[in-house]
Amino acid sequence: MSTLRPGARAPMLVTAAVLVAGCGSKAPSAANQQICTQAAERYVRCVGEELGPEAQRVAASPDKDGVAACARSQRTVAWYRDKCLPTTTCKAFMDCTLDLAMQEP
């Protein structure tokens, strides 16, 4: 037997509907795509510079392309735009991407 008063579930259902509607329901912006493409290109270049050509080939593999997922995450886009892409060396860029990977979601 439920202990909820009649109609108590309605706010939960509305909240769930709003959350689902807000999660990935629209396509990423062109600006987000551009930032993520720049980050991906720099990542592949820096993997080659820091780890060598074999690692670069693996990083450049089409099945490793994360641009779409990156562009859907405003947090990831902001991290690359504000912290990683402005770095001047591949070491700093790679350290920045590792810092992003180590952050809690």
Image (spheres, rainbow, N blue to C red):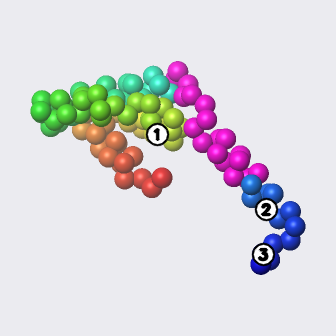
Give the CA separation, mark 2 to mark 1: 34 Å
Q: Which residue is mark 2?
A: 9
Sequence-wise, the earlier of marks 3 and 2 is 3
Name the residue: 34% across, 42% down: 96
Quick check: can you spot residue 25? yes
**In the drawing, what numbered circle is on residue 28?**
none
- Residue 101 horizontal side relative to residue 33, left or right: left
Task: Give the amino acid type for the residue marked by disc 1 in the picture.
Answer: Thr
Q: Residues within 10 Å of mark 1 (few under 14, many from 20)?
A: some
Q: Which mark is residue 2?
A: 3
Q: Which residues are magenta?
A: 14-31
Q: Which one is closest to the eye, mark 1 or mark 3? A: 3
* Rendered position, 68 above or below 15: above
Please determine whether, in this image, residue 105 is positioned above or below residue 90: below
Q: Position of residue 45 (x, y in %)?
A: 23, 27
Asked if the stretch drawn in magenta spans residue 58, the answer is no
Q: Residues within 10 Å of mark 3 (few under 14, many from 20)?
A: few
Whether residue 15 appears in magenta in the rendering, the answer is: yes
Q: Quadrant of residue 42?
A: top left
- Please give the residue where the numbered disc 1 appears in the rendered image: 76
First in residue order: circle 1 vs circle 3: 3
Which of these two is toward me, 42 or 55? 55
x and y percentages locating residue 72 in the rendered image: 51, 35
Q: Is residue 63 above or below residue 105?
A: above
Quadrant where the N terminus sits is bottom right
**Residue 27 in which image quadrant:** top right
